Image (tube, grey):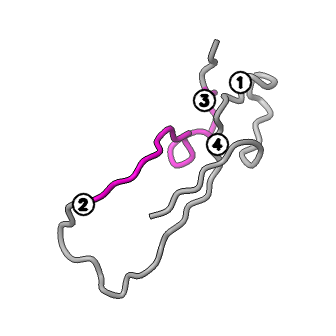
């Protein structure tokens, strides 16, 4: 039985677990993309696959322990 993720600050808002893997192509841009914009933005963050509720009721959750996520834009 899957347990819900606990309501703790390390798993909310910006750090909320993300369950999306995909690509977005042919997006509509409103305005102009700056010509000097060149490169890739990488975001590396914790993204637990299993709820820390399984481990000691989620009370000892460490954000850097476990699964991760790397995003590139």
Instruction: Kindly report the distance in space between the C-alpha atoms of the residues bearing marks 3 and 4.
Output: 9 Å
- Give residue 8's position: percent from left, percent from top: 64, 34
What is the quadrant of residue 29 in the picture?
bottom left
Q: Mark 3 and mark 2 in contact (Cβ < 8 Å)?
A: no
Position of residue 27 in the picture relative to residue 58 (left or right): left
> Which residue was labeled with disc 1?
53
| Element on which disc 4 rests | helix
Q: Mark 4 and mark 1 in contact (Cβ < 8 Å)?
A: no
Q: Main secondary structure of the magenta part?
A: loop
Instruction: Kindly report the distance in space between the C-alpha atoms of the residues bearing marks 1 and 4.
Output: 13 Å
> Which residue was labeled with disc 4?
10
Position of residue 9 in the picture relative to residue 39 (left or right): right
**What residue is rendered at 41% in x and 82% in y?**
38
Residue span colored magenta: 5-26
**What residue is rendered at 61% in x and 58% in y?**
44
Instruction: Kindly report the distance in space between the C-alpha atoms of the residues bearing marks 3 and 1.
Output: 10 Å
* Closer to viewer: mark 1 or mark 2: 2
| Element on which disc 2 rests | loop
* Closer to viewer: mark 4 or mark 2: 2
Circle 4 crowding by C-alpha within 10 Å: few under 14, some 14–19, many from 20: some
- Give residue 28's position: percent from left, percent from top: 20, 61
Question: Which sits earlier in the primary sequence, circle 4 or circle 2?
Answer: 4
Q: Please, is residue 65 above or below residue 53 in the view?
A: below
* Closer to viewer: mark 3 or mark 1: 1
Q: Please, is residue 30 above or below residue 2 in the view?
A: below
Which of the numbered marks, if any, corresponds to residue 1? none
């Amino acid at each position: 039985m899957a347990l819900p993720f606990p309501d703790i600050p390390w798993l909310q808002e910006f750090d909320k677990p993300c369950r999306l893997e995909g690509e977005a192509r042919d997006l509509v841009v409103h305005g102009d993309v700056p010509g000097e914009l060149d490169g890739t933005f990488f975001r590396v963050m914790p993204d637990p696959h299993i709820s820390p509720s399984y481990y000691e009721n989620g009370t000892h959750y460490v954000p850097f322990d476990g699964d991760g996520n790397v995003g590139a834009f």
